[in-house]
Image (cartoon, rainbow, N blue to C red):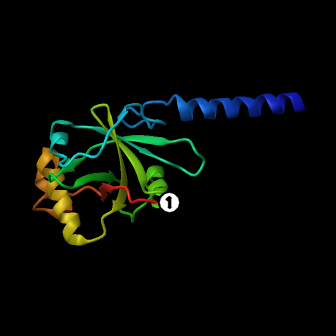
Amino acid sequence: MLKLLLGFLTLVVVTGILLATVGLEPQDRRPGTRLDGELVALPSTWSFTDATQEVHLETYPWYGIPFSVTTVLATDGANLYLPSIYNAPGAFPGTKFWNKVVVDNPQVRLRVAGKLYELEIHNITDPTEFDRAFMVLAGKYPFWQSALEDRDKRPYMALLKLIPRQAS
């Protein structure tokens, strides 16, 4: 019995180490682990992201294995915004695992076109900034255009802002 337990624990540890170091790419709705890519300095403008429809976001849960998701984002040039969409009304962080992770640790990595950017992510709570962020997203993603004037057509969502990491 002890050999079986030690074998199982070894398997769990090895699997955890592999997932943390090798990574599993997120795809569509399936989450992943560590993101591969070239770590680069933050750009002076984010306008190059206008040509990219989907990006990946890597978060850092307490247990040490990165957790990554596929999402969309939009920029007004200086600010980066991304949504977290819910099935029903609810307050951030809601039921989404990655939202709960970034509440505890806002440090993230964003991957755009194979490049990794180290950032922090924060929930937008100011209604004016929320509306501005939604307008930027609706400007990039036409399926939200009708929701610009009719708030009832907006999906249930939290909007988040990506900012440079604060020195620790």
Residue 6: % across, % down: 82, 32
In the depicted structure, whether residue 142 falls above or below residue 32: below
User: Would residue 4 appear left or right of 94 to someone viewing this image?
Assistant: right
The image quadrant of residue 55 is top left
The image quadrant of residue 153 is bottom left
In the depicted structure, whether residue 49 falls above or below residue 168: above
Camera-nearest residue between 95 and 47: 47
Residue 113: % across, % down: 27, 32
Residue beneath the point at 21% across and 67% down: 129
- Under mark 1, the amino acid is Asp
Label 1 sits on residue: 104
User: Would residue 22 appear left or right of 76 to someone viewing this image?
Assistant: right
User: Would residue 142 appear left or right of 17 to someone viewing this image?
Assistant: left
Any part of residue 134 in sight: yes
Residue 48: % across, % down: 16, 40
Residue 67: % across, % down: 48, 42
What is the crowding at mark 1: few (fewer than 14 residues within 10 Å), some, or many (at least 20)?
A: few
Residue beneath the point at 21% across and 55% down: 79
In the depicted structure, whether residue 88 falls above or below residue 72: below
Classify the position of the N terminus by image quarter: top right
Spot the residue most to the right. 1
